[in-house]
Image (tube, coloured by chain):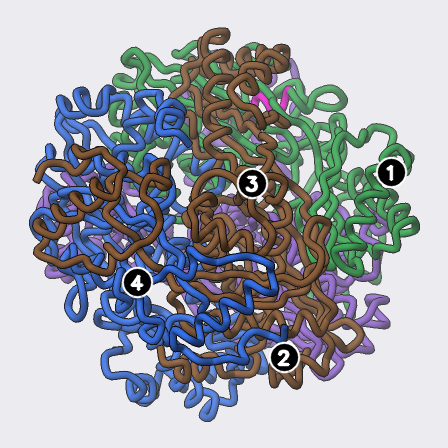
Chain colours: A blue, B brown, C purple, D green
């Protein structure tokens, strides 16, 4: 078998042909993978070399009461996972936050970044290039924005270091997650900068962006949406539904999420934000590799007037409601469940996701505080 | 609608009933989500509140030549994604590494960790507890291993800090990813320690484990499998298939992955390891939230005798070939494509995954070196 | 002996009396400590409970050719240390950079920060407080600047997280290192914010400042002066004076400072920037605890046209030429050697320090490349 | 003036001659620097190019009640600084910890590390080298220990990554800080490894050591002494002497040292451990650049039965009581004040230093809790 891209077709017949070749090469039968229902033509821009589909069980949690600027009311939240006990746990969290009147949530930052690295002749040359950029920021913006109907350049930071010059471009990208939009716009701007300054673009992504790797710069400054959320859970609900106390949850969060995370050299401090994010990302056609950035969430708990105050800060939530996997049939339906499909919906989606992360954090902290994490897993058969 | 867990059934009828409730609640039609083929009873331990399935397009890359201790020969590697251009890119990488004779890969660490945090009375009490543990390590091991048929306690590190005592347990977990096995075994050991020392377990997971959050402790010491791999790509192949030069790729890796990552405060230095890991994790039923740890990969390039040497180190690859999502029909078939289903296969899977990560890193570095990352995305229609 | 502050006097007699008490308490004779020559009254604002002086051997390196915006020409650089071989090494580095025509150096950032943390009622309250601050930034500035003759508020970033609101104030502080100026000005602004918003200031220093602790925020965004410098060393000089090759130095820097630092989870990547900074800080009356921030320096080497290009980026160089220890007699003289005493000199000092750090990095990398670090230490008798 | 090392003499006349040359070069008079009393011959192995001494005001704090394994009783602690208010503050902390019955302190780790980096041919070669080392660890130890009378090799970790192989050697170094001892011993072992395995040592210090740079590896695993200490301060003392409450101090530590440090991407979480360490390091002839590692201290506070529990963990305290600057006259006397001069005293010194760090942390947290940090600085005239 030659390298697999020779048949480049996207029809079901093309998919069948390729899958048959895989079956032959690997002496397997791929009946389940073949049993998909979506039209492969619709996935033309989502994958190459398609041979079928993976089916991920989809469930939901909720209703979850969200008090956002864009999402207001009760929502069912779809989650796709193969990790038993996750939805049961988040669902319990939803019940608790509802008892607390819902999750208050706001988006405090919203920008996608791309940071090309240029090779210069050294410090002097880098500073000349920065000077040119500063003086010609309008031309740079124009070059970038000419490539896109929706992207708006809203910031440009400069980081010179030796013969390297990093430029961190920030864009508003409307309802797309927007990384590709950024890449294309940044490249156009970078080409202008190359031409005018003599700095040579080495990579349009110089890793100060920073995409799909955990990095302090995103934890501190944000990438995609920066979302903060909180809720106060009445003491009685903590007792009745989590079988523990406010004090125990606060103590657990302190020793585990604050002290333990710090001693481990972690970026972020949370229990399992990545679990909720991964399940929602897969359900709604987001890029699951960007769960990495979301995992730098900060979860905090305090006792306030006897009740349990809990908050999350997700510094870097990279999501969209148009483009990418969002338009595939099952994913589009999952977005529809929350009324988050298409234009004008990405902030609403971000708010719901943050609220669900909070619910999941709450439930797991409660379970650990009650001392039965191991038992919960054992009972649910994993 | 009450909190969604009331109908706890797992039959297709139960799923239908729940989905109908969701449709009504959200005024949607979920036809695509309903069009799944796997038996929901088989997903009983993977999800609660199931209403259907998300279909993720599955493709493959390869053949990929792997020279491992467990995986030897040519493999097709299944990847599930909605990110266009990814498989085409990784596939090109496979072609390149094959031209280099394949990817040499070895597993240098293999242990799953759990680190409970205990509350003690202070430094003196923590040291007494450590003393007891040290002197009674056999009893601790026995308590832990009594809970599991496969897990073996192979290490226990102690980190006292004020009134906190963290114990980092390491287990061999055979072919399971093993986190739940660890959790249960650790909890049993912890209960013994509590009883004998008076230290109070606050959380069985004290975040020095550290699961699904990026943390230096795992980047340095590893969690799950630590895998290293390398390959030397002939200069002609770099030129003909990536349209760039060895020097340009090395320079790109240096400025982007080394300098850029360092300036961003990143854990790990790579181009997009998380992309390949997420696509393979979803295809094979791994826990996608654990892509977080895998994203701390280190990718290095050097010119050696005119050719391109490239290597990856994945410090923390948390995978299994039994348990979790691996037994679901589509996922099991995906494993089968690589001959990685079931007992005795997890190391083989780890080797193939590392080789595929290397191929993906190579291709993206080449594309960026050739200066057309933006163009590639534009052309593939995203 | 009661707690030592009862005698609060600053005369030589007071110092003698206290020292005698210490001698009695500890059954020692402190003759060397007693043999100081500076007037203790002049140290009144530098120390309490004075009993004498520690003498630190002072040497110098240079001449060092600096091509700065403020420092131009050849400088002798005073360094106080007890670490043998350090000055010999840096001096060799000076000779090398002079052979390269001197160190080009520029200051690209200059601001001192203070970040109080406030306790709020939660997300909603934090956002209200931020809104008030944004709308009343002139009043905030006025409150801050009313406390200082030199400080100018030049930035204010907001970081809300749960019931915590961090405000990162940035000030121009003229030629003082300026941390206390910042603290006082920030506190005044914070009191206004407290009064108007109901947010409660918990600490004027909420550790997002961040002083005397290593933190990504300062590595990325800078604190104090951010200085970049470079130099190209001719290949012949590398060979003749360092007994190694350009290629070997570049390779050493790559494997040690880039790869090794990354694998260790380091902030910054350098050989021993802290050594030069500590020696110059002590010589010139800077705060030696702020060497911590300076230690996050990035050192990079490349081969350019056969010669050795070397650069440093010191993201966070917190220094002054007025205030603090700079006015003590020996320290003031050390500043005078470089023409850096008093008003209008702090940027000049920053440029010279960065150049000296580069020289020291170069020499150590050369020594390690030549494979004789161990031998060098052995020979110099340590 | 040629490069300054031509006159290599160490007599007072040599020092005078060099100083005169500096005075002429820089058109200064260096009378204070000339007014030193120590014999420059005694500093022969501590500095090159000596021209005099810097005088750092020395004070003391205490008595400080220490309950260590090596240090037991009341100690006066010498501190050299130019930062006003520091000693007054630490002294107040001493009074408070004495009210709490003293600081309980223990050393839980004690090893100096050196991590050379080798260049290998790749993964396969690195693993062969590791195999050889594992099988010949006795020969490696013998080679290392042959170079030293006191050093004992107690650990060797291996970190292969591409064509890089890092070996982290750990040594017991008796009462020397021991870095040079380690360097020499490691180099000897490395030469043997080079010869037997063909791996090429690129640098004896490959930055996984890691010296004088902030790095997670040392925060987690320790370097030099790892020291933990705690104390419980009665509520009345908090109120009467710090004019604040237990609750306020705990809250300050939480928001500042835990939350703020985490959000800043810090290694360690403390208020100003580096201040105390720098002042004690300078007083006692330690290497002040190693304050960097000490700055990764963790400070924790809790309310326990109404009183204030406070603890510190200093993961990496690199100190000695022989060698380096400890033998200079003023520094030796400072050590003598604590009964910490010479052989058999380094652990005692480590315990006292940790106790003093705790006292300083306590006082500053109290001051910030009481809301008058700005005012304290203003009043003491800085």
Labelled pair 4, 2 in contact (Cβ < 8 Å): no
Q: Which residues are magenta?
A: D348-353
Is D349 magenta? The answer is yes
Q: Which mark is residue B248?
A: 2
Residue that label 4 marks = A224
On the image, the x and y values in percent for residue A353 come to 23, 51
Q: Give the overall secondary structure of the magenta segment.
A: helix
Q: Is residue D63 above or below residue B52?
A: above
Q: Residue at x 88, y 32 (%)?
A: D138
Please state which of residues D346 and A369 is positioned toward the viewer in this rendering. Answer: A369
Please state which of residues D42 and B243 is positioned toward the viewer in this rendering. Answer: B243
What is the C-alpha distance between the residues marked 2 and 1? 40 Å
Q: Which mark is residue D140?
A: 1
On the image, the x and y values in percent for residue B78 come to 51, 61
Tag 1, which secondary structure? helix
Q: Residue at x 70, y 31 (%)?
A: D111
Labelled pair 3, 2 in contact (Cβ < 8 Å): no
What is the C-alpha distance between the residues marked 3 and 4? 29 Å
Residue that label 3 marks = B223
What is the C-alpha distance between the residues marked 1 and 4? 51 Å
Is D161 magenta? The answer is no
In the image, taking residue C181 as reference, residue C235 lies left or right, namely: right
Q: Residue at x 61, y 56 (%)?
A: B352
Quadrant assignment, res B47: top left
Q: Residues within 10 Å of mark 2 (few under 14, many from 20)?
A: some
Mark 3 or mark 4, whichever is nearer to me: 3
Please state which of residues A263 and A289 is positioned toward the viewer in this rendering. Answer: A289
Q: Residue at x 56, y 42 (%)?
A: B342
């Amino acid at each position: 078998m030659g390298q697999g891209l020779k048949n480049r077709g996207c029809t079901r017949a093309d998919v069948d042909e390729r899958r048959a070749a895989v079956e032959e090469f690997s002496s397997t039968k791929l009946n389940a993978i073949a049993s998909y229902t979506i039209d492969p033509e619709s996935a033309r821009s989502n994958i190459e070399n398609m041979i079928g589909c993976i089916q991920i069980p989809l469930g939901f949690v909720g209703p979850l009461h969200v008090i956002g600027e864009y999402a207001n009311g009760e929502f069912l939240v779809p989650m796709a996972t193969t990790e038993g006990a996750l939805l049961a746990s988040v669902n319990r969290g939803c019940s608790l936050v509802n008892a607390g009147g819902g999750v208050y949530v706001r988006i405090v930052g919203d920008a996608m970044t791309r940071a090309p690295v240029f090779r210069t002749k050294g410090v002097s040359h880098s500073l000349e290039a920065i000077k040119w950029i500063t003086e010609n920021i309008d031309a740079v913006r124009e070059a970038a924005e000419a490539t896109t109907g929706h992207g708006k350049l809203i910031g440009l930071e400069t980081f010179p270091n030796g013969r390297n010059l990093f430029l961190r471009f920030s864009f508003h990208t409307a309802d797309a997650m927007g990384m590709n939009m950024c890449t294309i716009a940044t490249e156009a701007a970078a080409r202008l900068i190359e031409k005018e300054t003599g700095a040579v673009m080495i990579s349009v992504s110089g890793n100060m962006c920073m995409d799909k790797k955990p990095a302090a710069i995103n934890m501190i400054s944000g990438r995609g949406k920066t979302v903060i959320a909180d809720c106060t859970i009445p003491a009685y609900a903590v007792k009745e539904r989590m079988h523990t106390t406010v004090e125990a949850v606060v103590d657990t969060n302190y020793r585990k999420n604050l002290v333990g995370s710090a001693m481990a050299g972690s970026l972020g401090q949370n229990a399992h934000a990545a679990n909720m994010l991964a399940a929602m990302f897969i359900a709604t056609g987001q890029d699951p590799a960007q769960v990495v950035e979301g995992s730098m969430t900060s979860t905090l708990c305090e006792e306030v007037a006897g009740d349990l105050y809990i908050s999350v800060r997700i510094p870097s939530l990279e999501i969209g409601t148009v483009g990418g996997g969002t338009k595939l049939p099952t994913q589009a339906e999952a977005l529809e469940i929350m009324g988050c499909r298409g234009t004008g919906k990405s902030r609403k989606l971000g708010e719901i996701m943050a609220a669900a992360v909070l619910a999941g954090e709450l439930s797991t902290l409660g379970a650990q505080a009650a001392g039965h994490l191991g038992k919960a897993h054992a009972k649910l058969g994993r």
